[in-house]
Image (cartoon, grey):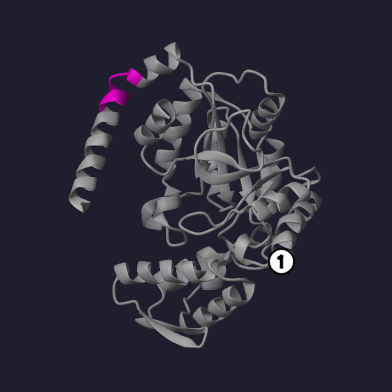
Amino acid sequence: MVVIRFLKMKVSLLLKTMLFYCGFFAVKRSLWPHKKIAILRYHAVVERTKNDYTSPSIAISPKQFERHVRYFARKYNVISLDQAVALLQSKAELPANSVVFTFDDGYADNYLAYQILKKYQASGTIYLTAHAIDRREHFWLSEVTMRILKSSAQSFAIEHAGEKSTYPLTNIVKRWRAVRAMVRLIKSNDRTVRESVRGQLAKQLDIPGFQSKMENLMLTWEQIHEMQENGMIFGAHTLTHLNLPNAGAADARKEIAECKTFMEEKLGIPVIHFSYPNSGPYEYFTPEVRNMVEQSEYISAVTSAAGFAESNNDFFAIKRVRTVPSLIETVAGIELG
């Protein structure tokens, strides 16, 4: 079954590549315009060899990202998230072939993404993990990833729920398995468990220069203000990237509502867009969490579910288009979706 699935993927990519390079998608787009909005979902924009702080599955190289921007700026209608939401709310006919660039988390490498967008007279929206931007605490996902990947230790142990588990770090495959295990454990529990795991990792997996690397990992408010002045939009991605369904109602509401208040004080304008954190094979979005976002007076919220934005959507459960695959796969996903 694995072999058959692999062969199907290879054949699918080959067909998409042929359609892309023979101009099929460009012709299809001009003859039958796409009347839904593709909200593109990015995270980190970093060279693979320099990426030790996030999963390769959510990272794209600057060169690849520029290919995306150049392609969509030339062949599509790049609009802002503000424009997209206003169009959806008005239920007016949507402009053909529209795309929106969005980024989750607020990595420092997003500043390069902004420069690339600006080069092609485009803009985007960055959803910020507010306290990580403010250096009030480290961005836990990157902290866990970096400690496990870069430590010289050959193993570590975690005590949780009365049990102690040991994780070997003798090769890169085992290190990534350990990263996934820690992420799964943290996302499946509340803040208390998250902080316990972070504390245990910090005691066992020290890295030279770790504090400095973490201090420079995220965007600064100075960069954000510059980008804001040049058309970039900033939305909320919670205070600390806590998994909301597992946080407990009071803690989840605090992460959502206080992120908005905090960012508005920093930016000087209303923060009206939200992105739910912690997607993947984890429960990160529930009706209860969705209602908390609406009650906190945002006007839109995006998920990581694959799909397009339409006027009949729930504005607090807007779907997006994954972008980490190649440009060909991303374009094919839009054109054939």
Residue at the extreme top: 31
Residue at x-position 48% and y-position 79%:
206
Above/below status of 168 relative to 188: below
Which residue is denoted by mark 1 in the rendering?
251
Q: Is residue 20 magenta?
A: yes
Q: Which residues are magenta?
A: 18-24
Figure quadrant of the C terminus: top left
Above/below status of 142 relative to 155: above
Q: Secondary structure at mark 1?
A: helix
Amino acid on which disc 1 is placed: Asp
Residue at x-position 79% and y-position 53%:
261
Above/below status of 147 relative to 86: below
Circle count: 1
- The answer to whether any part of residue 143 appears in the image is yes
Give the image location of residue 103, x and y in percent.
56, 45
Displayed quadrant of residue 119: top right
- Decide which of 133, 223 is in the foreground and name it: 133
- Decide which of 104, 32 is in the foreground and name it: 32
Give the image location of residue 82, x and y in percent.
69, 33
Give the image location of residue 277, x and y in percent.
58, 55
Give the image location of residue 282, x and y in percent.
50, 59
Residue at x-position 39% and y-position 27%:
336
Question: Please, what is the dominant secondary structure of the magenta stretch?
Answer: helix
Displayed quadrant of residue 139: bottom right
Mark 1 residue crowding within 10 angstroms, few (<14) / some (14–19) / many (20+): some
- The answer to whether any part of residue 241 appears in the image is no
Residue at x-position 30% and y-position 67%:
173
323 left or right of 273 in image? left
Displayed quadrant of residue 225: top right
Q: Is residue 34 magenta?
A: no
Above/below status of 328 relative to 22: below
53 left or right of 248 in image? left
